[in-house]
Image (tube, rainbow, N blue to C red):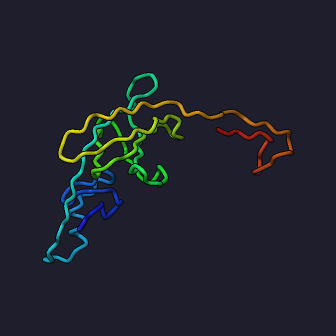
Amino acid sequence: MAEACPRCGYPAVADDKCPQCHVVVSLYQASLEKLGEKIDFLARPLARLPLSVFLPDGTVPQRAQIQWRRDGEDVPPQKHLASWSLQRRILDLRPGTYVLRATCGELEELRSVEVSVLAKPGSSNEEIVLRLEKRLGITGRVLFPKGVFNAAPGTTGNMGWR
């Protein structure tokens, strides 16, 4: 029985392609079983959440990451990730209340505010709009006198940081 994708753990429906790692769950499960053995699948309803992501200037990024967690769940945001693009705008989740956030950039320089959504199965969920904003933070360069800070061979005394 596949309650989640056996390969990556993403909530997946049996006999369906996993939206996270793209493995066909039924074929993957079947390859783990012996030939001729009966296989039982447990299908669970999924809610399809259409997402739109916008950059601060109102344009659409080529791609972004969607971080999600169940409302009230205390997990690091990196635990549940999905890729987003114009070609992959739908996030499939089990029914329930979730907190979603979009990020973009190599260092997640852009991030949306967290949005709470109710994922309902079997009905059309409203489009969720996530607007990316620049993260607050300090950027700059710390300068040390030569010889004061030598973290690595060849260090000249200056250390860049973000």
Q: Residue at x 17, y 46 (%)?
A: 122
Where is 39 relative to 143, above or below?
below
Give the image quarter of residue 101: top left
The image shows residue 56, relative to residue 4, as above or below, that is above
50 sits to left or right of 139: left
Q: Quadrant of the C terminus?
A: top right
| Horizontal side of residue 58 vs 122, given as left or right | right
Q: Looking at the image, which residue is at 49% across and 52% down?
A: 76
Residue 98: x and y in percent read: 36, 46
Q: Position of residue 146 (x, y in %)?
A: 85, 41
Q: Residue furthest top?
A: 57
Q: Quadrant of the N terminus?
A: bottom left
Residue 61 place in picture, x, y as percent: 40, 31
Q: Position of residue 21 (x, y in %)?
A: 33, 54
Q: How many marks?
A: 0
Q: Is residue 96 above or below residue 113?
A: below
* Foreground pick, 154 / 119: 119
Give residue 9's quadrant in the image.
Answer: bottom left
Q: Where is 136 relative to 26, above or below?
A: above
Q: Which residue is more in the foreground, 81 or 36?
A: 81
Give the residue displayed 80% in from the left and 41% down from the top.
Answer: 157
Residue at point 34%, 47% (across, down): 97
